[in-house]
Amino acid sequence: MAYPKEFTLAEHLVVSGEDVLTPGHELGINRQYAQLQIHVTAVVGDTACIVIFQTAKHGTDWVDIDQTEPLGAVGVTELALTEVSKHLRARIQRQGDDSVELTITGVSHQVFCTPRDIKSTALPDQAFSEMSDEEMMQGCLAATDEAMSYLGASFDGPLVSWGGALRLHTANMAAYHLLKQRGIDVGNESMIRQAYEDALEWLQRGAPTDPTILDASPGVGARTAYGVSQPRRGWPQ
């Protein structure tokens, strides 16, 4: 599974004067997809909006990555954030005498590949030209869930880290499922199907001994303090 984890950026927050910047929230290890819900319970005016920030790649500066349309009515607004970094925060801003009361919650997911990986390793960009990153991320989630159903025999999720092989194979799995849903172009079906089958074979034969796949269970004989757990029987929990 993609190990969904709930979090809260703001709870019953009233903004009526200066803009408010929420504390930074740590999503966790390798959680590259987050779904946010902004619950507006009271609002005056129509200038309030939410700007979402994440830490830059080097981990110190904050950069804005998305924002809502003006929040002029009570209700729920959703944002889907793809390829996010380790930390998120929100700025609630408004103008004049406008005010807003809201709660911001979310769910983060661990995914083994991203839409960028699909485009760069699985198939050319044009194959997915009619798909949004959010639609492609659903394929990444499905591929991660499917991959973990195999990896769960040898590793305890969520994983701490993994390498290019798992990223490549899950990107191929995601591409297969996305294009199967849309309708695979004639002439590409055998190639896409073969890449998918190769991925499943690698998950069964190659992945259990891949030194780049690390889980959070040291165990006996682990490679590092966060090493690969010893093979175990049973279905992943």
Image (cartoon, grey):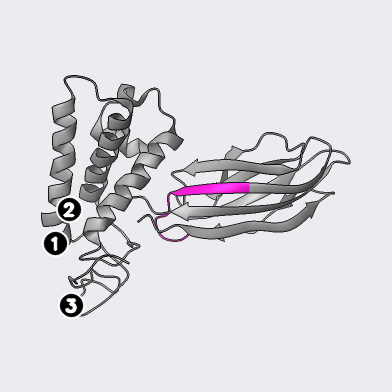
Visible in this render: residue 215? yes
Q: Which of 123 and 191 is in front in this view?
A: 191
Mark found first going from the N terminus, 1 or 3: 1
Q: In the rendered view, would you say 41 is above or below 181?
A: below
Displayed quadrant of residue 217: bottom left
Q: In whole angstroms, how far apart are the C-alphas of marks 2 and 1? A: 10 Å
Q: Residue 198 at x, y = what percent?
A: 13, 43
Quadrant of res 148: bottom left
Give the quadrant of the N terminus.
bottom left
Q: Which of marks 2 and 1 is in front?
A: 2
Dot 2 amino acid type: Leu
Q: Dot 2 corresponds to which residue?
A: 203
What residue is disc 3 on? 221
As for residue 171 lying within the magenta part, the answer is: no
Residue located farthest toward the top when viewing the structure as drawn: 186
Q: Position of residue 210 (x, y in %)?
A: 16, 58
* Amino acid at circle 1: Thr
193 with respect to 103 (left or right): left
Question: Magenta region: which residues?
Answer: 26-37
Q: Mark 1 points at which residue?
A: 209
Instruction: Please give the name of the residue rendered at 53% of the width and 59% of the height, measured from the top-left corner.
Output: 6
* Label drawn at residue 43: none
Q: Earlier in the sequence, mark 2 or mark 1?
A: 2
Q: What residue do we see at 58% from left, 39% from top?
A: 66
Q: Nearer the viewer, residue 86 or 76?
A: 76
Quarter location, residue 99: top right
